[in-house]
Image: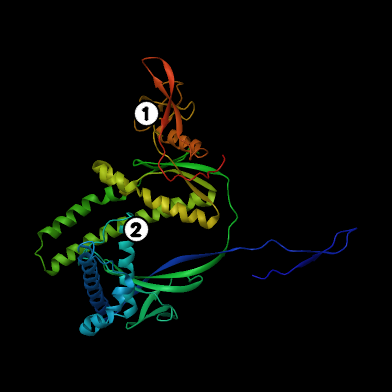
Amino acid sequence: MNVPRVETTRPGHRACTTRPQRLYLMLTRKAFRYRVYPTPSQEARLGEWESALRWLWNLANEQRLMALSRPRDGRKYYTAFDQMLELTPLRAEAPWLADVPRDVCAQLLIELDQAWQRCFKRIARQPRWKRKGRDFISLTEPHPKMWRLDGSNIRFPKLGILRTVLHRPLEGTPKTCTIKRDGDQWFASIVCEIELPEPAPRTEPVIAIDRGIVNVTADSDGKITTSPRFYEHARKRLARAQRTVSRRKKGSKNREKAKLRVARLHRKVRRQREHFVHTLSAAYAKSHGIVVVEKLNTAGMVRANRGLARGILDAGWGQLVECLRYKLAWSGGTLVEVPAHYSSQTCSDCGIVDSKSRRSQSEFRCVACGHADHADLNAAKVLKSRANRSALPVEGSSLDAHRSRKAKKKLRVPRGQSSQSPVL
Protein backbone atom coordinates (compact mmCIF):
# COMPACT_ATOMS: atom_id res chain seq x y z
CA MET A 1 0.00 0.00 0.00
CA ASN A 2 1.16 3.55 -0.66
CA VAL A 3 2.21 5.39 2.48
CA PRO A 4 2.47 9.20 2.11
CA ARG A 5 5.56 11.04 3.29
CA VAL A 6 5.20 13.34 6.27
CA GLU A 7 7.11 16.63 6.56
CA THR A 8 8.54 17.21 10.05
CA THR A 9 10.67 20.08 11.34
CA ARG A 10 12.64 20.49 14.55
CA PRO A 11 14.00 23.71 16.07
CA GLY A 12 17.48 24.43 14.73
CA HIS A 13 17.21 21.85 11.97
CA ARG A 14 16.10 22.08 8.40
CA ALA A 15 13.00 20.37 7.18
CA CYS A 16 13.40 16.65 6.66
CA THR A 17 11.22 13.97 5.12
CA THR A 18 10.36 10.86 7.12
CA ARG A 19 8.31 7.76 6.35
CA PRO A 20 5.89 6.52 9.02
CA GLN A 21 5.85 2.92 10.13
CA ARG A 22 4.41 0.59 7.50
CA LEU A 23 1.08 -1.00 8.33
CA TYR A 24 0.93 -4.72 7.56
CA LEU A 25 -2.39 -6.43 6.89
CA MET A 26 -3.23 -10.03 7.75
CA LEU A 27 -5.58 -11.92 5.43
CA THR A 28 -7.63 -14.48 7.31
CA ARG A 29 -10.85 -16.42 6.91
CA LYS A 30 -13.72 -16.46 9.35
CA ALA A 31 -16.91 -18.53 9.29
CA PHE A 32 -20.35 -17.20 10.23
CA ARG A 33 -23.01 -19.79 11.08
CA TYR A 34 -26.70 -18.96 10.72
CA ARG A 35 -29.90 -20.90 11.25
CA VAL A 36 -31.99 -21.38 8.08
CA TYR A 37 -35.62 -22.45 7.79
CA PRO A 38 -36.29 -24.18 4.46
CA THR A 39 -39.85 -24.72 3.31
CA PRO A 40 -41.19 -28.31 3.23
CA SER A 41 -40.49 -28.55 -0.51
CA GLN A 42 -36.98 -27.14 -0.06
CA GLU A 43 -36.29 -29.52 2.82
CA ALA A 44 -37.43 -32.49 0.74
CA ARG A 45 -35.15 -31.40 -2.09
CA LEU A 46 -32.22 -30.97 0.28
CA GLY A 47 -32.81 -34.52 1.51
CA GLU A 48 -32.71 -35.79 -2.08
CA TRP A 49 -29.49 -33.88 -2.68
CA GLU A 50 -27.95 -35.45 0.42
CA SER A 51 -28.76 -38.93 -0.86
CA ALA A 52 -27.34 -38.13 -4.30
CA LEU A 53 -24.12 -36.72 -2.86
CA ARG A 54 -23.76 -39.69 -0.52
CA TRP A 55 -24.00 -42.00 -3.54
CA LEU A 56 -21.46 -39.89 -5.44
CA TRP A 57 -19.00 -40.00 -2.51
CA ASN A 58 -19.27 -43.78 -2.22
CA LEU A 59 -18.89 -44.25 -5.98
CA ALA A 60 -15.81 -42.01 -6.20
CA ASN A 61 -14.29 -43.63 -3.12
CA GLU A 62 -14.84 -47.12 -4.54
CA GLN A 63 -13.19 -46.03 -7.80
CA ARG A 64 -10.09 -44.96 -5.90
CA LEU A 65 -10.02 -48.18 -3.86
CA MET A 66 -10.26 -50.35 -6.99
CA ALA A 67 -7.49 -48.34 -8.69
CA LEU A 68 -5.23 -48.70 -5.63
CA SER A 69 -5.86 -52.45 -5.35
CA ARG A 70 -4.29 -53.16 -8.75
CA PRO A 71 -0.70 -54.41 -9.09
CA ARG A 72 1.98 -51.79 -8.67
CA ASP A 73 2.60 -51.49 -12.42
CA GLY A 74 -1.07 -50.85 -13.24
CA ARG A 75 -1.94 -48.85 -10.15
CA LYS A 76 -3.56 -45.47 -10.74
CA TYR A 77 -3.89 -42.55 -8.37
CA TYR A 78 -7.06 -40.62 -9.19
CA THR A 79 -7.19 -36.91 -8.49
CA ALA A 80 -10.15 -34.63 -7.99
CA PHE A 81 -9.64 -33.22 -11.50
CA ASP A 82 -9.74 -36.73 -13.03
CA GLN A 83 -13.01 -37.53 -11.36
CA MET A 84 -14.55 -34.14 -12.16
CA LEU A 85 -13.94 -34.86 -15.88
CA GLU A 86 -16.11 -37.96 -15.52
CA LEU A 87 -18.80 -36.03 -13.67
CA THR A 88 -20.45 -34.57 -16.80
CA PRO A 89 -21.31 -37.90 -18.53
CA LEU A 90 -22.35 -39.34 -15.16
CA ARG A 91 -24.82 -36.49 -14.58
CA ALA A 92 -26.23 -37.05 -18.07
CA GLU A 93 -27.08 -40.66 -17.19
CA ALA A 94 -28.47 -39.91 -13.70
CA PRO A 95 -31.11 -37.12 -13.72
CA TRP A 96 -31.41 -37.22 -9.90
CA LEU A 97 -27.69 -36.41 -9.68
CA ALA A 98 -28.01 -33.69 -12.32
CA ASP A 99 -30.56 -31.95 -10.09
CA VAL A 100 -27.73 -31.17 -7.65
CA PRO A 101 -25.73 -28.04 -8.63
CA ARG A 102 -22.56 -29.08 -10.44
CA ASP A 103 -20.27 -26.95 -8.28
CA VAL A 104 -21.61 -28.70 -5.18
CA CYS A 105 -20.79 -32.10 -6.72
CA ALA A 106 -17.32 -30.94 -7.74
CA GLN A 107 -16.62 -29.60 -4.25
CA LEU A 108 -17.55 -32.99 -2.78
CA LEU A 109 -14.94 -34.67 -5.01
CA ILE A 110 -12.36 -32.10 -3.87
CA GLU A 111 -13.14 -32.91 -0.22
CA LEU A 112 -12.71 -36.61 -0.97
CA ASP A 113 -9.34 -35.93 -2.59
CA GLN A 114 -8.24 -33.91 0.44
CA ALA A 115 -9.25 -36.79 2.72
CA TRP A 116 -7.12 -39.21 0.69
CA GLN A 117 -4.16 -36.79 0.76
CA ARG A 118 -4.37 -36.71 4.56
CA CYS A 119 -4.41 -40.50 4.53
CA PHE A 120 -1.30 -40.68 2.33
CA LYS A 121 0.49 -38.27 4.68
CA ARG A 122 -0.51 -40.45 7.67
CA ILE A 123 -2.43 -37.60 9.25
CA ALA A 124 -5.81 -39.35 9.19
CA ARG A 125 -7.30 -42.72 8.43
CA GLN A 126 -8.60 -43.95 5.10
CA PRO A 127 -11.88 -42.25 4.07
CA ARG A 128 -14.85 -44.44 4.87
CA TRP A 129 -18.16 -44.91 3.11
CA LYS A 130 -21.00 -42.53 3.91
CA ARG A 131 -23.98 -44.23 5.51
CA LYS A 132 -27.48 -42.84 5.76
CA GLY A 133 -28.41 -41.83 9.28
CA ARG A 134 -24.80 -41.76 10.47
CA ASP A 135 -22.96 -39.34 8.16
CA PHE A 136 -24.50 -36.01 7.23
CA ILE A 137 -23.44 -34.54 3.89
CA SER A 138 -22.70 -30.83 3.62
CA LEU A 139 -23.64 -28.92 0.46
CA THR A 140 -20.93 -26.36 -0.31
CA GLU A 141 -21.19 -23.78 -3.07
CA PRO A 142 -17.56 -22.62 -3.57
CA HIS A 143 -18.19 -19.81 -6.08
CA PRO A 144 -19.40 -16.53 -4.53
CA LYS A 145 -21.19 -15.47 -7.74
CA MET A 146 -23.53 -18.47 -7.64
CA TRP A 147 -25.12 -17.57 -4.32
CA ARG A 148 -25.84 -14.27 -2.60
CA LEU A 149 -27.53 -12.60 0.32
CA ASP A 150 -30.96 -11.32 -0.66
CA GLY A 151 -31.70 -8.86 2.11
CA SER A 152 -31.61 -10.90 5.29
CA ASN A 153 -32.06 -14.23 3.47
CA ILE A 154 -29.77 -16.50 1.43
CA ARG A 155 -30.41 -17.28 -2.23
CA PHE A 156 -28.93 -20.70 -3.05
CA PRO A 157 -28.72 -22.21 -6.57
CA LYS A 158 -31.80 -24.26 -7.57
CA LEU A 159 -33.34 -23.74 -4.13
CA GLY A 160 -34.30 -20.11 -4.28
CA ILE A 161 -34.56 -18.00 -1.17
CA LEU A 162 -33.89 -19.66 2.19
CA ARG A 163 -35.33 -17.87 5.19
CA THR A 164 -32.31 -17.06 7.37
CA VAL A 165 -31.79 -15.57 10.82
CA LEU A 166 -28.83 -13.18 10.48
CA HIS A 167 -28.18 -12.68 14.16
CA ARG A 168 -24.90 -10.86 13.43
CA PRO A 169 -23.60 -9.04 10.35
CA LEU A 170 -21.03 -10.50 8.00
CA GLU A 171 -17.46 -9.19 7.96
CA GLY A 172 -15.18 -8.98 4.94
CA THR A 173 -15.85 -10.56 1.55
CA PRO A 174 -18.15 -13.62 1.43
CA LYS A 175 -16.60 -16.57 -0.40
CA THR A 176 -18.33 -19.92 0.17
CA CYS A 177 -21.72 -20.97 1.49
CA THR A 178 -22.33 -24.39 3.07
CA ILE A 179 -25.71 -25.83 4.03
CA LYS A 180 -25.72 -28.70 6.51
CA ARG A 181 -28.25 -30.59 8.58
CA ASP A 182 -27.89 -30.94 12.34
CA GLY A 183 -30.56 -33.37 13.44
CA ASP A 184 -33.87 -31.71 12.57
CA GLN A 185 -32.27 -28.27 12.09
CA TRP A 186 -30.53 -26.68 9.10
CA PHE A 187 -27.64 -24.25 9.20
CA ALA A 188 -25.74 -22.17 6.66
CA SER A 189 -22.04 -21.46 7.18
CA ILE A 190 -20.62 -18.51 5.24
CA VAL A 191 -16.84 -18.20 5.02
CA CYS A 192 -15.55 -14.65 4.56
CA GLU A 193 -12.10 -13.27 3.80
CA ILE A 194 -11.14 -10.51 6.22
CA GLU A 195 -8.20 -8.12 6.08
CA LEU A 196 -7.06 -7.26 9.58
CA PRO A 197 -4.10 -5.18 10.73
CA GLU A 198 -1.40 -7.54 11.91
CA PRO A 199 -1.47 -7.48 15.72
CA ALA A 200 1.61 -6.48 17.66
CA PRO A 201 3.33 -9.49 19.27
CA ARG A 202 2.39 -10.00 22.91
CA THR A 203 4.88 -11.63 25.25
CA GLU A 204 3.38 -10.86 28.64
CA PRO A 205 1.85 -12.14 30.79
CA VAL A 206 2.78 -15.83 30.52
CA ILE A 207 0.65 -18.65 31.86
CA ALA A 208 0.84 -22.45 31.74
CA ILE A 209 -2.22 -24.73 31.68
CA ASP A 210 -2.40 -28.33 32.84
CA ARG A 211 -5.38 -30.28 31.47
CA GLY A 212 -7.16 -32.99 33.41
CA ILE A 213 -10.39 -34.95 33.69
CA VAL A 214 -11.67 -33.92 37.13
CA ASN A 215 -10.33 -30.39 36.61
CA VAL A 216 -10.40 -29.32 32.98
CA THR A 217 -7.68 -26.70 33.52
CA ALA A 218 -5.32 -25.75 36.30
CA ASP A 219 -3.05 -22.81 35.49
CA SER A 220 0.18 -21.57 36.95
CA ASP A 221 -1.61 -18.55 38.46
CA GLY A 222 -3.48 -20.82 40.86
CA LYS A 223 -6.88 -20.98 39.13
CA ILE A 224 -8.66 -24.33 38.82
CA THR A 225 -11.64 -24.91 36.49
CA THR A 226 -13.69 -27.96 37.38
CA SER A 227 -15.05 -30.11 34.58
CA PRO A 228 -18.79 -29.48 34.02
CA ARG A 229 -19.16 -33.12 32.81
CA PHE A 230 -21.99 -32.41 30.39
CA TYR A 231 -21.99 -35.93 28.94
CA GLU A 232 -22.01 -37.62 32.36
CA HIS A 233 -25.06 -35.61 33.40
CA ALA A 234 -26.90 -36.63 30.21
CA ARG A 235 -25.96 -40.34 30.25
CA LYS A 236 -29.15 -41.55 31.95
CA ARG A 237 -31.40 -39.70 29.53
CA LEU A 238 -29.31 -40.92 26.61
CA ALA A 239 -29.52 -44.52 27.85
CA ARG A 240 -33.32 -44.34 28.11
CA ALA A 241 -33.61 -42.75 24.67
CA GLN A 242 -31.34 -45.37 23.09
CA ARG A 243 -33.31 -48.20 24.71
CA THR A 244 -36.44 -46.72 23.19
CA VAL A 245 -34.82 -46.79 19.76
CA SER A 246 -33.86 -50.45 20.13
CA ARG A 247 -37.45 -51.39 21.02
CA ARG A 248 -39.04 -49.70 18.03
CA LYS A 249 -39.66 -51.55 14.80
CA LYS A 250 -37.06 -50.91 12.13
CA GLY A 251 -38.32 -48.69 9.35
CA SER A 252 -41.24 -47.31 11.37
CA LYS A 253 -41.95 -43.64 11.97
CA ASN A 254 -41.83 -44.16 15.74
CA ARG A 255 -38.25 -45.41 15.39
CA GLU A 256 -37.34 -42.30 13.42
CA LYS A 257 -38.84 -40.12 16.14
CA ALA A 258 -36.88 -42.01 18.80
CA LYS A 259 -33.63 -41.62 16.82
CA LEU A 260 -34.32 -37.90 16.48
CA ARG A 261 -34.63 -37.62 20.27
CA VAL A 262 -31.21 -39.26 20.70
CA ALA A 263 -29.72 -36.87 18.15
CA ARG A 264 -31.19 -33.88 19.99
CA LEU A 265 -29.66 -35.02 23.30
CA HIS A 266 -26.23 -35.45 21.70
CA ARG A 267 -26.56 -32.06 20.03
CA LYS A 268 -27.35 -30.39 23.35
CA VAL A 269 -24.29 -31.94 25.02
CA ARG A 270 -22.07 -30.91 22.10
CA ARG A 271 -23.31 -27.32 22.16
CA GLN A 272 -22.83 -27.07 25.92
CA ARG A 273 -19.24 -28.28 25.58
CA GLU A 274 -18.51 -25.91 22.68
CA HIS A 275 -19.86 -22.93 24.62
CA PHE A 276 -17.77 -23.84 27.67
CA VAL A 277 -14.57 -24.32 25.64
CA HIS A 278 -15.01 -21.08 23.67
CA THR A 279 -15.66 -19.06 26.82
CA LEU A 280 -12.66 -20.55 28.62
CA SER A 281 -10.25 -20.14 25.70
CA ALA A 282 -11.39 -16.57 25.01
CA ALA A 283 -10.70 -15.60 28.63
CA TYR A 284 -7.12 -16.92 28.45
CA ALA A 285 -6.48 -15.40 25.00
CA LYS A 286 -7.62 -11.94 26.10
CA SER A 287 -5.73 -11.82 29.38
CA HIS A 288 -2.41 -13.50 28.44
CA GLY A 289 0.14 -13.11 25.66
CA ILE A 290 1.78 -16.55 25.88
CA VAL A 291 -0.05 -19.71 26.88
CA VAL A 292 1.98 -22.85 27.59
CA VAL A 293 0.29 -26.25 27.28
CA GLU A 294 1.55 -29.81 27.38
CA LYS A 295 1.92 -31.60 24.06
CA LEU A 296 -0.42 -34.58 24.19
CA ASN A 297 -1.52 -37.14 21.63
CA THR A 298 -5.19 -36.97 22.57
CA ALA A 299 -6.36 -39.44 19.92
CA GLY A 300 -3.76 -42.00 21.00
CA MET A 301 -4.68 -41.58 24.66
CA VAL A 302 -8.35 -42.17 23.85
CA ARG A 303 -7.54 -45.37 21.95
CA ALA A 304 -5.12 -46.67 24.59
CA ASN A 305 -7.05 -45.77 27.76
CA ARG A 306 -10.57 -47.06 27.31
CA GLY A 307 -11.38 -46.32 30.92
CA LEU A 308 -10.40 -42.65 30.61
CA ALA A 309 -11.59 -42.12 27.03
CA ARG A 310 -15.04 -40.86 28.02
CA GLY A 311 -13.61 -38.35 30.48
CA ILE A 312 -10.98 -37.07 28.03
CA LEU A 313 -13.54 -36.56 25.28
CA ASP A 314 -16.05 -34.98 27.65
CA ALA A 315 -13.42 -32.47 28.82
CA GLY A 316 -12.66 -31.36 25.24
CA TRP A 317 -8.85 -31.32 25.50
CA GLY A 318 -8.16 -31.10 21.79
CA GLN A 319 -10.87 -28.55 21.08
CA LEU A 320 -9.55 -26.30 23.86
CA VAL A 321 -6.04 -26.23 22.37
CA GLU A 322 -7.33 -25.50 18.86
CA CYS A 323 -9.46 -22.61 20.12
CA LEU A 324 -6.50 -21.22 22.05
CA ARG A 325 -4.29 -21.48 18.97
CA TYR A 326 -6.35 -19.35 16.59
CA LYS A 327 -7.65 -16.91 19.20
CA LEU A 328 -4.13 -16.15 20.38
CA ALA A 329 -3.02 -15.69 16.77
CA TRP A 330 -5.75 -13.11 16.21
CA SER A 331 -4.68 -11.11 19.26
CA GLY A 332 -0.91 -11.38 18.69
CA GLY A 333 -0.34 -14.06 21.32
CA THR A 334 1.52 -17.35 21.09
CA LEU A 335 0.69 -20.92 22.01
CA VAL A 336 3.73 -22.91 23.19
CA GLU A 337 3.63 -26.69 23.49
CA VAL A 338 6.17 -28.33 25.81
CA PRO A 339 6.86 -32.00 26.66
CA ALA A 340 4.43 -33.51 29.14
CA HIS A 341 6.67 -36.32 30.41
CA TYR A 342 6.72 -36.68 34.23
CA SER A 343 5.14 -33.26 34.76
CA SER A 344 2.81 -34.71 37.43
CA GLN A 345 5.77 -36.31 39.28
CA THR A 346 8.17 -33.37 39.19
CA CYS A 347 8.47 -30.92 42.05
CA SER A 348 8.10 -27.33 40.89
CA ASP A 349 10.27 -26.11 43.75
CA CYS A 350 13.37 -28.36 43.69
CA GLY A 351 12.95 -30.32 40.43
CA ILE A 352 12.97 -33.80 42.00
CA VAL A 353 11.22 -36.43 39.87
CA ASP A 354 9.58 -39.14 41.96
CA SER A 355 6.26 -40.93 41.54
CA LYS A 356 5.80 -41.09 45.32
CA SER A 357 5.43 -37.31 45.46
CA ARG A 358 2.00 -37.60 43.81
CA ARG A 359 0.06 -38.80 46.83
CA SER A 360 -3.45 -38.68 45.33
CA GLN A 361 -5.49 -37.05 42.60
CA SER A 362 -5.19 -33.63 44.19
CA GLU A 363 -2.32 -33.88 46.70
CA PHE A 364 1.35 -33.38 45.83
CA ARG A 365 4.05 -33.48 48.51
CA CYS A 366 7.70 -33.66 47.46
CA VAL A 367 9.57 -36.54 49.12
CA ALA A 368 12.82 -34.54 49.08
CA CYS A 369 12.07 -30.94 50.09
CA GLY A 370 8.56 -31.34 51.51
CA HIS A 371 6.99 -28.85 49.10
CA ALA A 372 3.19 -29.28 49.21
CA ASP A 373 0.73 -28.04 46.60
CA HIS A 374 -2.29 -29.08 44.61
CA ALA A 375 -1.12 -31.72 42.14
CA ASP A 376 -2.59 -30.00 39.09
CA LEU A 377 -1.25 -26.57 40.08
CA ASN A 378 2.20 -28.05 40.66
CA ALA A 379 2.12 -29.63 37.19
CA ALA A 380 1.15 -26.30 35.62
CA LYS A 381 4.12 -24.60 37.28
CA VAL A 382 6.41 -27.35 35.98
CA LEU A 383 5.10 -26.80 32.46
CA LYS A 384 5.77 -23.07 32.76
CA SER A 385 9.36 -23.73 33.81
CA ARG A 386 9.84 -25.98 30.76
CA ALA A 387 8.85 -23.27 28.28
CA ASN A 388 12.38 -21.81 28.30
CA ARG A 389 14.01 -25.12 27.41
CA SER A 390 11.31 -26.79 25.34
CA ALA A 391 13.85 -27.72 22.64
CA LEU A 392 16.26 -29.38 25.13
CA PRO A 393 15.91 -32.66 27.04
CA VAL A 394 13.85 -32.19 30.16
CA GLU A 395 16.21 -32.55 33.08
CA GLY A 396 15.21 -33.40 36.59
CA SER A 397 16.64 -35.03 39.67
CA SER A 398 15.52 -38.54 40.54
CA LEU A 399 15.70 -39.47 44.22
CA ASP A 400 17.34 -42.85 44.79
CA ALA A 401 16.03 -44.14 48.12
CA HIS A 402 18.53 -47.00 48.35
CA ARG A 403 21.71 -44.98 47.86
CA SER A 404 20.38 -41.70 49.27
CA ARG A 405 21.82 -39.65 46.45
CA LYS A 406 20.45 -37.56 43.59
CA ALA A 407 21.01 -38.82 40.07
CA LYS A 408 20.37 -36.86 36.87
CA LYS A 409 17.46 -38.19 34.89
CA LYS A 410 17.19 -37.46 31.17
CA LEU A 411 13.68 -37.38 29.79
CA ARG A 412 13.13 -37.71 26.07
CA VAL A 413 11.43 -34.96 24.10
CA PRO A 414 9.11 -35.68 21.13
CA ARG A 415 10.60 -34.97 17.72
CA GLY A 416 9.70 -31.83 15.84
CA GLN A 417 9.74 -29.57 18.89
CA SER A 418 10.37 -25.98 17.88
CA SER A 419 13.66 -24.45 18.96
CA GLN A 420 12.09 -21.01 19.31
CA SER A 421 10.64 -20.56 22.76
CA PRO A 422 9.84 -17.51 24.85
CA VAL A 423 12.19 -16.35 27.54
CA LEU A 424 10.30 -16.15 30.79
User: In the figure, residue 146 lies in which quadrant?
Assistant: bottom left
Residue 421 sits above or below residue 404 on the image: below
Q: Nearer the viewer, residue 284 or 228?
A: 284
What residue is rendered at 88% in x and 62% in y? 14
Q: Which residue is mark 2?
A: 271
* Residue 407 occupies quadrant: top left
Q: Position of residue 215 (x, y in %)?
A: 37, 41
Look at the numbered disc 1 and give the secondary structure of its residue.
Answer: loop
Circle count: 2
Q: Where does the C terminus fall, quadrant-wise?
A: top right
Foreground residue among 89 and 310: 89
Q: Is residue 392 above or below residue 19?
A: above
Whether residue 209 sits left or right of residue 10 in the image: it is left
The location of residue 416, given as percent across then percent down, is: 43, 46
Q: Is residue 288 visible?
A: no
- The answer to which of 213 and 138 lies nearer the viewer is 138
- Asked if one can make out residue 178 in the rendered structure from this viewpoint, the answer is yes
Quarter of the image with the N terminus in it: bottom right
- For label 1, the residue is 358
The answer to which quarter of the image holds residue 422 is top right
94 is higher (above) or lower (below) than 424: below
> Image point 77% across, 66% down: which residue?
6
- Which residue is farthest front? 73
Q: Which mark is residue 15?
A: none
